Image: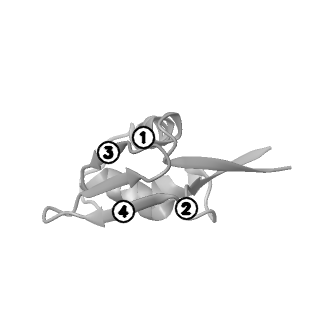
Amino acid sequence: MDKIPVCNPAVVARKTFDDGMVLVNSDTGMSLALNSTGALVWEFTDGSRDPAAIAPEIAGRFTEVPDSVPEDIDACLQVLADDGFIGYDVLY
């Protein structure tokens, strides 16, 4: 069973001057600031990729990539899910 992260449509996202992003969940009023890597995770959370497919997309954007990229993406997605910024489609 695959879990595909999907952005909550109630979330408003705005890029910042430093390639980061600010998210505001209009359902809850919560906001979250993402750094440039977190902003890329958000952009690739489009309902077409599972977390394993997001990792190479992120890694391809940088010259020096730590081995922990898959775990870091999972951690970022967990924070986004815990705070209601994303949900998951489940594929059987």
Specify the amino acid type for callout 2. Answer: Pro
How far is mark 2 from mark 3, CA to CA?
Answer: 15 Å
Name the spot of residue 46 as percent of width and height, x first.
55, 65
- Asked if the residue at tag 2 contacts the one at tag 1, i.e. Cβ–Cβ closer than 8 Å, the answer is no
- Reading the chain from its start, which is encountered first: label 1 or label 3? 3
- Residue, disc 4: 13
Q: Which mark is residue 9?
A: 2
Ranked by sequence position, the earlier of labels 4 and 3 is: 4
Distance between mark 4 and mark 3 Cα atoms:
10 Å
Residue nearest the observer in this picture, 7 or 31: 31
Instruction: Report if the CB atoms under discs 1 and 3 are less than 8 Å apart.
Output: no
Residue under label 1: 76
Of residues 66 and 75, which is closer to you in this image? 75
Label 3 SS: strand
Residue type (three-letter) at the residue carrying disc 1: Cys
User: What secondary structure is found at the residue carrying circle 4?
Assistant: strand
Q: Type of residue at label 3?
A: Leu
Q: Secondary structure at mark 2?
A: loop
* Amino acid, disc 4: Ala
Q: Residue lying furthest left in this view?
A: 17
Which mark lies nearer to you, 1 or 4?
A: 4
Looking at the image, is mark 2 or mark 3 earlier in the sequence?
2
Residue 7's quadrant in the figure?
bottom right
Check disc 3 and report the residue beneath it: 32
Cα distance between the residues tagged 1 and 2 = 18 Å
Which one is earlier in the sequence, the residue at label 1 or at label 4?
A: 4
Q: Could you classify mark 4 by the number of other residues whose Cα lies within 10 Å: few (under 14), some (14-19), or many (20 or more)? A: some
> Residues at badges 2 and 3 in contact (C-beta under 8 Å)?
no
Local packing at callout 2 (Cα closer than 10 Å; few below 14, some 14-19, many 20+) is few
The x, y position of residue 42, in whole percent, is 43, 57
5 relative to 58 in the view: left or right: right
